Image (cartoon, rainbow, N blue to C red):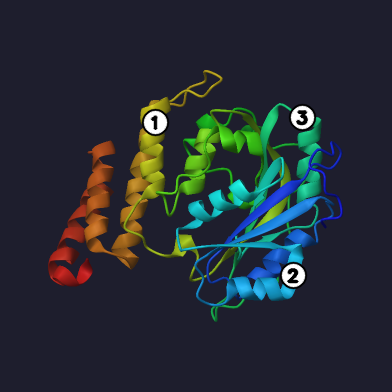
């Protein structure tokens, strides 16, 4: 995979793939093989170990030798790991894959070909499929892609800032981005342990147009340790969106503005969903605060009022045991 060396080769620009890894022993070999077995010939793979305690970096070195560069850091979260990989990279194009996810064959070839044909596009991404574990925590073979075809998903291509206000439509494991674009936004915000990719794409969307290929490019593995399955006190995507709106407002670089009422409904739903998740699986203290914040965006919402009251009752009943 590293047979071509010059990143200046215009036909095959070097793609640096950054893979953050934390205690990724059960999955990382499959993730790495999905990169090294791509049919694109000019790749460097950088695995950034984020303070693993399960021997992840040693296992990678033993299995793959110099086919993979392994960097180590104290545990600092995925944003810090990705930034370290970006700084160490030699490629003109950057791609990302988490250590428990998998790329489909042909991902990079399709994306690089598109970028070479469209020099005005700074970000190319695509579709992904969730790969759910079964009851015992193991994984059956992933589902086959359906509905793929030529061309782009036009609704999610172009200046996508407005679309990003309503959803993080760019899954980082499907993205290929020019290094110059990442440098223009100073990489990822290391103060964020979650939501860091959403923040990145919002800032990137102010700098460049993007294209979404109508092609499934990756499998996102969902298991008990997945970030989205663990209740966290901070509502970082909400924090990111509020900060972005304060900085840039509703209009994208193309001058087209999002509907203000729709954005307020989005903010309400982000708070309500955070509270609902915590009410059933996390902290009633966090849930009550989230429902209160939701009411700031829609004071007349009966369901937010009811759940705020239910969270308060649950908090009083559990007392300090529900911090």
Alpha-carbon span between mark 3 and mark 1:
29 Å
Whether label 3 touches label 1, CB < 8 Å: no
- For label 2, the residue is 65
- For label 1, the residue is 245
- Residue 118 numbered mark, or none: 3
- State which tag comes first along the sequence, 2 or 3: 2
Q: Is residue 27 left or right of residue 149?
A: left
Q: Is residue 235 left or right of residue 118?
A: left
Alpha-carbon span between mark 2 and mark 1:
46 Å
The vertical placement of 69 against 248, above or below, is below
Give x and y (percent) for residue 244: 41, 33
Of the pair 283 and 9, the residue shown nearer to us: 9
- State which tag comes first along the sequence, 2 or 1: 2
Residue at coordinates 61% horizontally, 34% vertically from top-left? 181
* Residue 136 showing in the rendered view: yes
Give x and y (percent) for residue 252: 51, 24
- State which tag comes first along the sequence, 3 or 1: 3
**Where the N terminus falls, by quadrant?**
bottom right
Alpha-carbon span between mark 2 and mark 3:
35 Å
- Residue 49 numbered mark, or none: none
Of the pair 247 and 277, the residue shown nearer to us: 247
């Amino acid at each position: 995979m590293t047979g071509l060396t010059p990143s200046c080769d215009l036909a095959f620009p070097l793609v640096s793939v950054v893979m953050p890894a934390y205690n990724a022993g059960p999955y990382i070999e499959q993730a790495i093989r999905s990169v090294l077995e791509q049919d694109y010939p000019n790749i460097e793979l950088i695995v950034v170990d984020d303070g693993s305690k399960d021997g992840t970096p040693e296992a990678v070195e033993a299995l793959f030798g110099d086919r993979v560069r392994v960097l180590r850091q104290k545990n600092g979260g995925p944003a810090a790991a990705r930034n370290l990989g970006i700084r160490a990279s030699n490629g003109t194009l950057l791609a990302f894959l988490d250590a428990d996810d998998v790329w489909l064959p042909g991902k990079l070839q399709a994306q690089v070909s598109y970028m070479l044909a469209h020099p005005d596009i700074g970000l190319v991404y695509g579709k992904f499929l969730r790969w759910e574990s079964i009851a015992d925590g193991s994984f059956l073979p992933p589902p086959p892609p359906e509905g793929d075809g030529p061309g782009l998903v036009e609704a999610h291509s172009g200046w996508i800032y407005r679309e990003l206000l309503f959803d993080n439509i760019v899954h980082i494991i499907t993205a290929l981005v020019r290094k110059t674009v990442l440098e223009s936004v100073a990489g990822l915000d290391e103060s964020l342990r979650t939501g860091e990719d959403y923040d990145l794409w919002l800032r990137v969307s102010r700098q460049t147009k993007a294209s979404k290929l109508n092609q499934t490019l990756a499998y996102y593995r969902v298991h008990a340790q997945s970030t989205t399955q663990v209740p966290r006190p901070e509502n970082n995507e909400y924090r990111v969106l509020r900060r972005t709106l304060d900085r840039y407002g509703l209009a994208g670089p193309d001058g087209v503005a999002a509907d203000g009422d729709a954005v307020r409904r989005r903010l309400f739903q982000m708070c309500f969903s955070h509270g609902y998740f915590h009410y059933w699986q996390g902290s009633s203290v966090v849930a009550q605060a989230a429902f209160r914040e939701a009411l700031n965006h829609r004071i007349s919402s009966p369901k937010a009022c009811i759940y705020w009251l239910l969270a308060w009752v649950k908090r009083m009943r559990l007392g300090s045991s529900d911090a």
